Amino acid sequence: MADLGAAGVALALFGGAIRASTPFLFVSLGECLTELSGRINLGLEGTLVCGAMSAYGAALLSGSPWLGVLAAALVGALLGALHAGLCSLKRVNDIAVGIALMVLGTGLAFFFGKPLIQPRAPMLPALHVCPTCQFAPLRAALDINPLFLIGVALAFVLRWGLANTRPGLVLRTVGDSSEAARAMGYAPLWVRLWSTMAGGALAGIGGAFLSLYYPGSWNEGLSSGQGLIAVALVIFARWRPLACLFASLLFGAAGALGPALQSIGVHQGTYLFNAAPYALTLAIMIATSSRNGMLAGAPGELGMVR
């Protein structure tokens, strides 16, 4: 790879963007659903870590990485239900509950995950797009995990469902005006419960990808703040699933920049390049800020104290 120069960087960025973007994709799609219902969940960082730990433990005990993914989704849905239940109480703030659940989820994952640091669980398989390719770097770059393809398909399904189905219309109505939803005969609390559970399940699957494929282990520093970054990503994407997909690839490429440069022998400033996703997050938050405090495309009830 070092002999390829700029081509080597491009290959490493391509493969790295696909791998590193998958957790961002699932967490951002989950948060997109949650926020479109008028609720924000900052606890997805804890859900991501809990999902990673649960997936690794379930895969280790069952011998099946796909059962690990299922376990991560269930744990994420349960944490989402807890968030929705607490936020349904009067005068409870979504953001405060999310921060509390982030700490709770992370603490639970660290506590129950202590015995999982050394054992080796079965990993998720990779799809070899070009198994006969003689060029090893290209062959490695084209190894794609099925979860990435599922996430891409899910982004298109959500885009279509939110625009063309009754559940999508109800979800967006609840997020824009709970009074209008009640007038239509729908219960906003139930809609927000299911959307927050779905968002938590998707975040849990994102955690499963981290522990069962890339980087493919369980340790306490696994997530590196990706759950929180995904919240900024949703704002950048203006609550649009397809935009979440492209924004996730952008963040994934930023995260892969450091390893890509190392692959061609650039070792100066490694830590600076590894900070690219966090710098990008700050830049996006500044660029999307508004003088009047309103963001284009934001659900009408997002961030309200109920």
Image: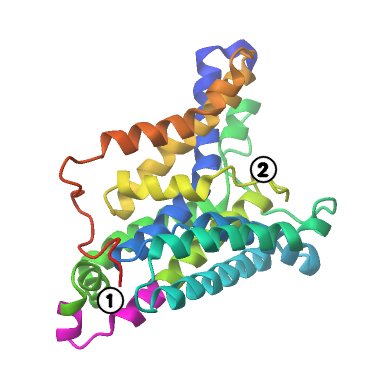
Residue drawn at x 20%, y 47% as measured from the top left: 293
Q: Residue at x 75, y 61 (%)?
A: 111
User: What residue sits right under mark 2 in the picture?
Assistant: 215
Q: Nearer the viewer, residue 242 or 268?
A: 268
Q: Position of residue 74 (x, y in %)?
A: 58, 72
Look at the image and tell me in which quarter the C terminus lies.
bottom left
Is residue 285 part of the magenta span, yes or no?
no
**Amino acid on which disc 1 is placed:** Pro
Q: Counting other residues with Cα less than 10 Å from the Cα at mark 2, is it few (<14), some (14-19), or many (20 or more)? A: few
Residue at image point 26% right, 66% down: 162
**Visual colour scheme:** rainbow
Q: Nearer the viewer, residue 177 or 138?
A: 177
Callout 1: 10 Å neighbours few (<14), some, many (20+)?
few
Residue 125: in sight, yes or no?
A: no
* Residue 65 horizontal/vertical position (percent): 69, 61
Q: Residue at x 80, y 51 (%)?
A: 117
Classify residue 199 as left or right of residue 142. Answer: left
Q: Could you say which quadrant of the image residue 49 lies in?
A: bottom right
Label drawn at residue 208: none
Visible in this render: residue 257?
A: yes
Q: Residue 220's x, y, as percent?
A: 70, 48
Q: CA distance from mark 1 to mark 2?
A: 36 Å
| Residue occupied by mark 1 | 167
Write down the region rendered in magenta. Answer: 180-195
Q: Is residue 222 above or below residue 94?
A: above
